[in-house]
Image (cartoon, coloured by chain):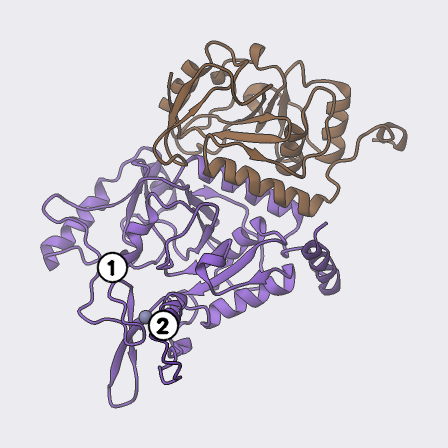
Amino acid sequence: MSAMETAGIEPGFRDPVFDSQHTFRCILDAFGYVGRAQVLSRANTRIGPLDPATIAVCLTLTDFETPIWLDPVADSKPVRDFLAFHCGVTVTSAEASSFAIVGNPASMPRLDQFALGTDLEPQCSTTLVIQVPAFDGGPLVRLRGPGIQSDISLAIPSLPSWFWEDWQANHELYPIGVDVLFTCGSSVLALPRSVSVEV
Amino acid sequence: MTANQEGAARGGRRSAYNFAYLDEQSKRMIRRCILKAMAVPGFQVPFGSREMPLAYGWGTGGIQLTASIIGPDDRLKVIDQGADDATNAVSIRRFFKKVTGVETTEQTSAATIIQTRHRVPETALEERQILIYQVPSPEPLKRLEPREAETRKMHAYGEYGLMSVQLYEDISRFGHIATTNSYPVMTNERYLMSPSPIPKFDNPKLGKNPAIQLFGAGREKRIYAVPPYTQVRSLDFDDHPFKVQRWTQSCSLCGATESYLDEILMDDKGQRMFVCSDTDYCATRKESQQASSNDGTSGSPAHPSREAEKGPNS
Ligand SMILES: [Zn+2]
């Protein structure tokens, strides 16, 4: 990328080493304490339609080893330029992606359109980063599984009507399957494949 | 930046290391593997193990995990067979002090990250604490099937019949299951897992623990995890239920009857005593006993050093 092209690119983390460490720990807590939102206090950059949490997750976890898929809302020149410059990622198809960035959940592909991994390599599946307008106010579901003491309810709005049905089908493939990180503003909330849902 | 971060950044420059030694690319790769391990409890995620300035057998798997998660605001505790003052623990603690500048502690309840070999602390862990196990041998099926390609398939298809056969052979030979360390567990009712060489006494602490438990094997290049509140079941049979070790003695220093005891040789005449393996637990109990008895004399014996017994992993 030439100097002229990088001129308009927003800065990433203020301190890449410490901010990505801090953000990772919040994401780890999100995977450890499922259904509970974690605030990414180092998330500070919004790019186009993408919230600071969505961008912070990309800055923390993606690089040239993790091809990503962008949905039509996320897929814009500022987002592509930013991720290419700061993370060195390449953009790929949904089924070949390590991470998938969903800016508009209402029109997202069905969960089985992403990489699901295999019995021998369940780790080779897509992590979906789904940006939502809020973590509450949507239809109520009940989650159970590792990371949850007994059960926890969740009411994420703006998901497609098929989402929880697909999620249960994803869970039934366990240990194969996708993992989800919901993002909103500066917060994240994880939904690992080990978790089952009751609508 | 917090004051700690500035100190850590300065320390990093002075010693010409990256913060926490690993480069950012390696940390990112390991962090991604940790999240996969959290999503599939008990599954061994392969990772690109990096060269560390300590030899394999000195906990390089655990060190890489700690290096990938630690930040300037953490308080690190390192134990080896329960002791903060064992050689392995001291050198790892010194390493992280040098490459991160973080605060270290011996107090289980004050630590945010605890790196351990061979024990789970007696003091119950809390949410958001992270327990990192140094694992010399991550494969629970290795004794039964030395070929890695085969054990991977057995995990993939949940073919664990051999393990039960092995345990049952124990019972028919010895009348009970003879395995006392690395006693195999079933994690989240899906993956057979080796809980590193902890004594089976500690197995019940693995399940439904509020803390995050991460396991790192450097030589074998595997990371696995037990997220908080995950079901972990020690393998057993209806007619031979799982039992932990019990001692008829109590700790000679603090009187504990519920902790894991080490037998210490006191002199060359064969005199022995039993003391808690967890030195922080033992010291904390002794302190509170002294405070409540209010006698103030300093006559109580110090924890004997067991340095010599704590060499590197095989
Ligand atoms: Zn004691």
For ligand 1, the image quadrant comes to bottom left
Q: Report the chain shown in purple.
A: B
Query: Which chain is mark 1 on?
Result: B
Residue lying farthest to the right in this orientation:
A4
Q: Is residue B99 above or below residue B149?
A: below
> Does the Cβ of the disc 2 residue fall within 8 Å of ligand 1?
yes
Residue lying farthest to the bottom in this orientation:
B269
Q: Nearer the viewer, residue B146 or B180?
A: B180
Instruction: Name the disc covering residue B244, or none.
Output: none
Residue B137 x, y percent position in the rendering:
38, 55
Q: Is residue B100 above or below residue B193?
A: below
**Which is nearer the N-term, disc 2 or disc 1?**
1
The residue shown at (51%, 19%) is A156
Which residue is tagged 2? B286
Instruction: Determine the secondary structure under disc 2.
Output: helix
Q: Closer to the observer: label 2 or label 1?
A: 2
Colour used to depict chain A in the structure image: brown
The residue shown at (39%, 19%) is A168
Q: How many marks?
A: 2
B222 sits to left or right of B157? right
B207 sits to left or right of B128? left
A146 sits to left or right of A66? left
Query: Which chain is mark 2 on?
Result: B
Which residue is tagged 1? B180
Q: Nearer the viewer, residue B223 or B295?
A: B295
Instruction: Determine the secondary structure under disc 1.
Output: loop
Residue B103 x, y percent position in the rendering:
59, 61
